[in-house]
Amino acid sequence: MSELGTKKSSRLSRRDFLKLIGAAGTGLAFAPFVPFGNFMPNPNQASLEKVPVILPDGTQANINTYPINHAEVITYPATGDAALDAEAFRKWQFIRLPEELGGDKKDVSAIRGYSMICLHLWCLWKYWPDEGRKRGECPCHGSMYDPLTGTAFVGPASLQAAPSDTLPKLDFEIASDGFVFVLPPKFNANENGVIGYGRFA
Amino acid sequence: MAVSLERRTGAVAFFYWLWDGIDRTIFTAIKFSFPARFVSPFGFLGMLTFIVFIILGVSGALLMFYYQPILDRAWDSVQFINDEVPFGFHIRNIHYHGSNAMVLLAVLHMYYQYFSGRYKIRNEVLWMTGVILGVVTILEAFTGYDVIFSERAELAISIAASLTTSIPVAGPLIRDAALGSGFSDFVLRFYAQHVFLLPIVMLGLMAVHFPRFLVFDVPMVMAIGGAILITGGVFPIDMGFKFEPTVPPGVTVPEWYLTGIYAFMRTQYDKFVTGLLWPLLFIISIVLIPFIDRYKKFSWRDRPLVTAFGITSLAQIMVTTYWGFYISPDISIPLVERLVIDPIFFYSTMILLVPLGFGFTYMMIKLANEAERKSKLAKSTGPKKVATINLSEKWINWVLVALLAFQVFLNIAAYNAALTGMKNLSLFFIGIILLVFAAFFHVYRYSISQEKNAPPPAPAPVQEEKPRLAEPAPSPESSKLPEGDASKAKPELKELSPEIPAKTQADLGVGVDNNPHIGSGDINKP
C-alpha cells in the first residue's frame, strides 16, 4: 500500500504530463515567429563608411580654406535620396572653432561635428559665431551648447541627465592636402552617441 | 516530481478572472466551440476565411511600416521590404499568399453553403452580406496587388480606371472622385482603399455576417496557416518589373480570381458590358438565389435545378479563369491577335457549358441516390465496419514526444535556413512547423478527451495486506515516460470511448450527439 502510494505521488499524473507537453508543443510552434521581430527596426539604408565632408555648396571641406569661427550644415550618412537626405536625423553642424578655443590650428582639434537634433525636443539648433555668443543655440526652448564639448550648459537640455545633455558627435580625419573626411561612427551612447538621445561626455 | 498544474494562482487566476468577465460582454452571444475531435472543415470555412483575414491584417500592418504609396517609390519600397528588411520576404509572402487563400476560402465557403442550401432557414441576410463581403474581398485583394506598381499592377490599375470611366454618363465623374486623375492619385488612393476603406467596409459587413455559432478548430487553422507559408516557400512571389512610363509593358495577366473577367474583356466587346455588366449580373443573381430557390429541402440532391445552376457557374468560372490566363506562346503572331479571344468561340463554349452542367448534375444526383440506396442495403445486411486507429496511451505519449522532437528539429532547420539567407526554405520550414503543430494538437486534444472520459482509478483492492509475490518489474519504457493511473483502466476505456459511426464521419463532420463539446447547432448554422 505504502509502496503504491509513494509511487503514485512521485510520478507526474497523465493529465499534467499532457498539459506540459501541450505547452511545450505550442511554444515550439510559435518560436520561429519570434525572430520576425527583427522586421521592425529599419535596417540602415546607408552604410557607415569614411566619406568626404561635403559642404552645402557641393565642395569638399578643406581645413586650409574653411573659415575660423564658422559652421555649415552637412548630411551624414547621405543616401542620394533627396527625401531621405532632408531628414533632420542626418543633419550635422560642421563647426570650425573660434580662435580662442583653438580654431586656428590646422588639425582635427580645430573642427567639430555635432548632431543638429537638440536633445531636448529635437528642434534643429545651430552655431552662432557672433561676438558674445559663439555657442550652439536651439530656437525652440533656448538650450545652449558648448561648441568645444557639445554639452548643454543652459536651458532644458542642460537639465537632462547624462547622456542626454551632450550632443552626438562625428569624428574627422584631415588628409595631407587639407581635405576633411568623416570617420565611420559608432552610434552608441559611449562612443559617437545616439542621435536624439545623447552621448556620455 | 509532484507537480500540480491545478492550482490557480497569480497570472493563471488573473486570466480566469478575465475569462469570467467575458460573461458581461457581447461575446457571450457568440457560441464558440473548440471541437475535441476532427470535424470536416467545410462546416467552418467562413471562420477559416476570417482567420486568414486576421493574418492578413497583422502582416499588412507590418508591411505598412515600410511601404511608400508614392508613384516613383512604391515599387522600390516593396523591393526594399523583399530584399533588405529582415524577414520582410516572409511577411510579404505571407501577405500575398494569404490574400489568395482568403479569396479561395471565401469562394469555397460560398459554394459549400450554396450546395448545402444553408441560405435557407432565414439565413438570407447572412447569404447576401456574405456575397457582398466576397466581392469586397476580391476588390481588397485587387487593390493590394496594384499598389506594388509593377508593370502588371499598372495594367491592372489602367483596366480598373478605364472600366470605371466606361460606366455610361457618370463614369468619368466616378473615376475622378473615387480613383483620382492620374497614376500618382491611383497609387495613393488604391492604397488608402486597400489599407483602410475596404477593410472597414469588410469589418462592418462581418459584424452583420457573423453567425452566432462559431467553430474554432485549432488544427485546421494551423494547417491553413502552414499551407500559406509552404506555398510562399515553394512559390515565392516575385517583384515583377518596375513600371516605367516610357517602356511598353510586357504581356501580363491579372490574379487568378480576375482572369475570368479578363477573358470576357479579351473578346473585345464593349468594355462596360464585358468588364462590369457581366460580373454584376453574376453577382446579383447569386445575391438573389435565396429568393429564386423555392425548394423545401436543403440537400443538393433534392434541389436539382439550383444545383445545376451552381455546377454550370462553377464550370464557366473554371473555363473562363483558365482562358483568361491563356495567351498563345507563338510570338510570331502580333500581340493584339494573341490577346484577343474569338467571341464566337468563347460565347458558344459558355453556352455549351450550360447543357453540360445540367447533364453532369443529373448524372451526379443519379449516382448519389444509387450510392445511398446501396449503402442502406449494405447497412441493413452486412456488419458495420469502421476503420479506427486505436493507440494505447503509452503510444499516444510517444507520438506526442516524437512530434515534439520533430518540432525541435524543424525549429533549428528554419532558424538555420534564415541565418544562411535561404529565405524561402525557412518560410517553408515554418509552414511545416505549423502543419506538424496541427497534427500535434489533434493528438493532444484526442488524448485529453480520452483522459476526460476515463473512469476514475479503481479503488485499492482490499487484499492489499497479503504478501505480494512476483510483481512484474516496470519496463524501462514506462519508467521513462510517465503515464499516470489511467493506463490501468485501459480495457474499460476502450468501451467508454465514443464510437463514431461511419455515416457521421463521411457526412461532412456533422456529428450530432457523439461529441459533448459541439452543440448540434454549431455546424448546422455556420
Image: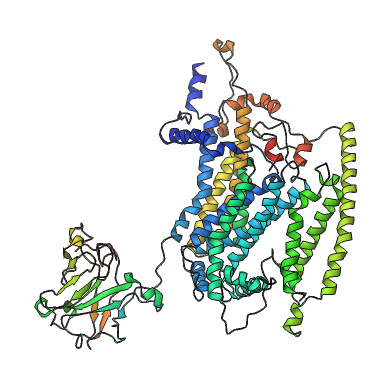
Residue B144 picture quarter: bottom right
Residue B345 picture quarter: bottom right
Residue B413 vs residue A61, the one in the foreground? A61
Residue B342 picture quarter: bottom right
Image spot of residue A59 (x, y percent):
29, 87
Residue at the image point whose x is 47% and y is 26% from the top? A10
Image spot of residue B86 (x, y percent):
46, 63
- The answer to whether B427 is drawn above or below residue B302 in the figure is below
Residue at the image point whose x is 63% and y is 55% from the top? B227
Image spot of residue A161 (x, y percent):
20, 56
Q: Quadrant of the C terminus of chain B?
A: top right
Q: Quadrant of the N terminus of chain B?
A: top left
> Can residue B122 be seen in this snapshot?
yes
- The answer to whether B109 is drawn above or below residue B344 in the figure is above
Image spot of residue B367 (x, y percent):
89, 48
Query: On the picture, is A100 further left or further right than B75?
Result: left
